Image: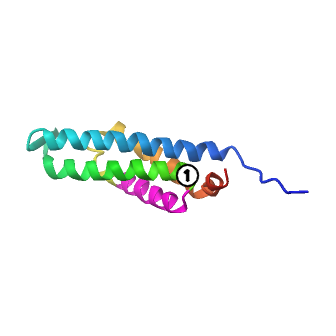
Amino acid sequence: MATEKKTSGWVGWGVFAGVILLISGVFSAVQGLVAVIGPNTYYVLTDGTLFLFDVAGWGWWNLLIGLGLIATGLALFAGQTWARVVAIILASLSAVVQLLLVPAQPWWSIIVIAVDVLVIYALTAHGRELRDE
């Protein structure tokens, strides 16, 4: 009699992580395209502080990260182990970068950090079940 592998409900959280990566990748890629096509400088004024960004460099960075997130999300659905590792690294970097944006967008930053923590937890605690599924 063959033994049946039992998967938990956390497989759904792994799929959630993949979907979030895909959505985040599409948003980043679109944001990057707009920044590359748009004006050369982007200004944000927050409580007397002025942040200056070179939009073209920031746009190329977002475009590349977005494409990487899309590829990682698709590979995560295929159960690739490297995709879990890359997804955890990208979610960790995203959470750290969001800390820099707290003065400009506090609520958005906190929400993104919370979602990143959920993605990291789902992939570290139950990521192997995605491969088995």
Residue 97 in sight here: yes
Answer with left or right where residue 70 lies relative to residue 132: left
- Which residue is at a point 45% across and 60% down the rendered structure image? 86
Q: Secondary structure at mark 1?
A: loop
Q: Where residue 97 sits in the image (x, y, percent)?
A: 32, 53
Relative image position of residue 75 (x, y in whole percent): 49, 53
Q: Relative to 5, does residue 45 appear above or below in the rendering?
A: above
Question: What is the magenta segment's predominant secondary structure?
Answer: helix
User: Height in image: 61 above or below 20?
Assistant: below
Q: Is residue 90 left or right of residue 101?
A: right
User: Residue tagged by mark 1?
Assistant: 78
Q: 111 or 2, which is in the foreground?
A: 2
Residue type indicated by callout 1: Ala
List x then y, in percent, for residue 60: 21, 51
Of residue 36 and residue 46, the one placed in the foreground of this image is: 36
Q: Residue at x 14, y 48 (%)?
A: 56
- What is the magenta range? 80-96
